Each structure stands twice: as C-alpha cells, then as structure tokens.
Image: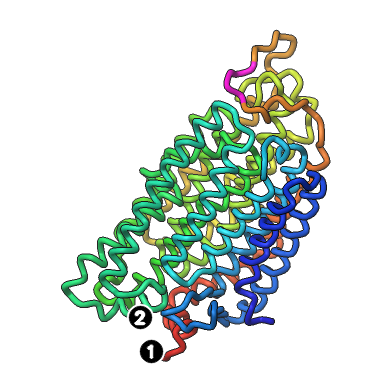
Amino acid sequence: MMAHLPIAPILLPFLAGTLLLVLGRLALPAQRWLALVAVLAQIGAAIAMLAAVSGGDILVYRLGDWPAPWGIVLVADRLSAWMVLVTTLLALWALIFAGKGIDAQGRHFHVLFQMQLFGLAGAFLTGDLFNLFVFFEILLIASYGLALHGGGKARTRAGLHYVVMNLAGSTVFLFAAGLIYASLGTLNLADLAAKASTLAPDMLGLARAGGLLLLAVFALKAALLPLHLWLPAAYSGTSAPVAALFAIMTKVGLYAILRSHTLLFGDSAGPLANLFDPWLLPLALATLFIGTLGALAADTLGRLAGYLVLVSVGTLLTGMSLGTQGIAAALYYLPHSTFTAALLFLLADAIRRRRPLHGDGFTPDADMPRHALWGGLFFAAAVAAAGLPPLSGFIGKFLVLRAAPDQPWVWAVILLAALLAVIALARAGSQVFFNSQAGKEATAPKPGASPSDTVLPGASSARELLAVGGLLGLILALTVFAGPALDYADATARQLTDPARYINAVLGAKL
C-alpha cells in the first residue's frame, strides 16, 4: 500500500473531477458534498504520505513499471509531501467558503477546483521536467476557468492578463526544456542531476541558457520582480475562495526554484553548480520591497492581500537563498504565509458583503463598528500577516534573519518591510472598521463590481466563520507545534542539500 502513496494525491482529485463532470446534472448540494469528501480523502492521503517519508525515506512510483529515466516516475520526499499537505489543508477551507453561493455563479466550479488540485499535486510529486510542464498546464488551465468564474468586467480584464502572462511562460518553459534535453539528453530530474557534473564543455552554453530560462519561467509562476505585475489584479479580481486557493500557486514556482536550485544546480552539479545563486537573493529582496510598497498604496483589502502575497514570496525566496538554515526557515514560514494570505482574501470578501456600498475599499462605513467580530478577526489576520509575535509568522521571520547573521541588507529589508506592512495593515483596519463618517450620506458603489459584490450582507455567515476559523486554527497549530514543524523543516532542508539520496532512490544506482 505504501508503494502507491505517491499517486494517491494525484489520482483522488482526478477521479473526483471526472465524476463531477460526468454527473454534471447533479444538484449543487450533492456536488458540494462529493467535493468535500474528495478533499477530505486527499488530506488523509497527504497525511499518510507525510508520515511515510518523515523518517527520511523517498518513495518512488514508476508508472507502467518502467524504470527511470525512461519511464515516468512520481517521487515523494519530505518536501513534496509537505507541499501536498499544505495544499490539501488550504483547499478544504476554500471549498467550504465557496459553498456559501460562490460556486453557483457559474458552471463546473467543483470540476475545475478538483482539476486544480490534480495539477498542483502532480507538480509537487513529478520526477520529470517535461511532466512538470504538463502538470503546470493542467493547473493553469483549471485556474483560468476558476479565475473567470462568475464573470464581471473587472474580473475578465484581470483574468485576461493572467492568462496571457502564463501562456507566454508556458512557451518559454518548452524552449527551456528543449535546451536542457539537447545538452544533457534527458528530462528526468534525477538523471539530469547525475549527468550535470559530467557535462561536455561544448554543451555548457546550451545547458546554462536552458537553466536560466527555467529560472525565468519559475520566477513568473512565483510572481518575482519584474514578473509580478499580473498578480495583485488577478488575485483581488477573482472570487475569494479561488484567490485563497491561488495562495499556493506562487509556492509552486518557489518549489520549482528550490528543487532545481538544490537538485539540478547544486554544489555537486559540476560546471552548472550554483547557476541560480547570483539571482536569487537580489530578486527576493527586490520583490519583498516592491510588494511592501504596493501594500502601502493599496486602496482595497483584496489588493492589499495580493501585495502581501508578493511580500511573502520575497521573504520565502530570501530564506531559500541563505543555505540549509535559511531553507529550513523558509519551509516553516511557507504554510504560515499561505494560510495567512488565504485568510486575508476570505476576510476581504466577508467584509465586502457587509459593506454593500463601499465594498472592501478603504472608506469608513457607519455600519462596520457594530461588526466587532469581523474587526477582531481582521486584527488577528493582520498580526499574522505582519509577522508579529506570538504567531508563527514571527518565528519564521526570526529564523530567516538568524540564517543571515553577516548580511545587513537582508536584515534591513526584512525589518523595514515588516514595519511598513504593520503600517499598511493598521491603515486598512482603522479606515474600514473605525467610523469617522457616522451620519454622513453613503457614496455610490464603485463601477465594474463583480456579481459576488452584490450578495446581500450578513447571509451564510456560518460557512464564512467556519472557513476563517479553520485557517486561523491552522496558523495557531503551526505556532503551538512549532517545535515538531521546525524539526521537520530542518530535516527537509538537510535532505534537499544531499541530492545523492534523491538520485539513488530514483535511479536505483549508488553514486
């Protein structure tokens, strides 16, 4: 049974999505229950896989029993299992929130949702560069439908930019894969890592070009500067549960960068060793700084959450560029930043629905002070997003700083970004929840609002509270169980910086 664990997180959402598509006339409540059962099963599979690899084992699933590098392989190690578990936990609360009526605003929401999970799990578990491209395309095609779900002028415009940018990235990915195959003769990740150290000098230029094009593609997926401009509008323009699920999308790009950086272009890669090193830290700090400026300039809660996603991307990549200790810090901070971004998107929608005239804009509303519960929830989310104690964001940022004891620029940018994030979140909270216009006549709603902005305020609060409370619970759990989580992150970082174990597990040969 354990041998089949790597394919379970891929197979379950695929089967669920196919079944939902076949049963297209099924009543929406039944679709919701089927989708919920599927996600719970995926969480169970992810937990089982995490338990199986937590001791350091690497599970390899050979499709068709074809050995690598000729056959397709799925590889579950500590990193991929961690990413799959974070994805499935996030999907549970996004799905529950969508059940308040957002999934009824268009066709095939639950089919697309499951196919998105199918693509995400495949991207984290594949052991082949070409199949990484395939799973990227699956999750992107599903995300195009989800991003546009419900329609609306603003959503369509933002979604179009998102689609165009990612189509361009997919084209570049094919060029990168072609150059790498031409120079190394394989696309299996373990085989690429094994052959990199013996690369012929006349092929070095092709391999370097392919590797740097890969970095550009992954940087686009992760929304690194200067390829970040699509994210704030796309994430704030789509529906809240979709934006919450998209909080893991940038982490796919970061995962691919980390996997390539440690496996394909690590210290043992010969002439290709440390190919990404000159780029990672400057890109990380620049993205962190620009994201913070965007958060200060944001005029809605949705756009603020979108720019804070960029801030988290910059913080994570900073950690990943600081060696084993920094990678461990980033892996601990990754679920915190994912759950916090999703929480902010869900809160923005809940607040918007209680302000039918002003939406989630930073305009005082005479009705909001009586919604003390939502103000308290926003305060908790703000503490988490800014990385303030006592929540897990503070622990993660502290560990990133500890990994850079002799790099004052890293300290300066991270601490300044944290301060400016506090200012941006405090400004948002004070303008939304503190009434300075009591008794004044309300202004008209902004033009171009999507259909979800016109839902009557106050309805379906049980699902909203359950989803928001679930994400807060995950953040608190990550804080309370910081010790075991940090031990796992540290073990994962050490496994990543020893690529020989991955290569041996996949190829079945000792180096």
**Amino acid at circle 1:** Leu
Q: Which mark is residue 459?
A: none
Name which residue lies at 46% across and 78% down: 71
Relative to 419, does residue 433 appear above or below in the rendering? above
Q: Secondary structure at mark 2?
A: helix
Residue that mark 2 sits on: 194
Specify the farthest residue to the bottom: 510
**Labels 1 and 2 touching (C-beta < 8 A):** yes
Using the image as rendered, state which of residue 353 and residue 447 is in the foreground.
447
Q: Position of residue 476 (x, y in %)?
A: 71, 55
Residue that mark 1 sits on: 511
Q: Which residues are magenta?
A: 445-449
Asked if residue 200 shows in the view, the reply is yes
Name which residue lies at 59% across and 28% down: 152
Relative to 115, does residue 272 appear above or below in the rendering? below
What secondary structure is the stretch in magenta mostly built from? loop
Q: Secondary structure at mark 1?
A: loop
Q: Position of residue 392 (x, y in %)?
A: 63, 56
Q: Position of residue 329 (x, y in %)?
A: 52, 63
Relative to 143, does residue 10 appear above or below in the rendering? below
* Quadrant position of the N terminus in the picture: bottom right
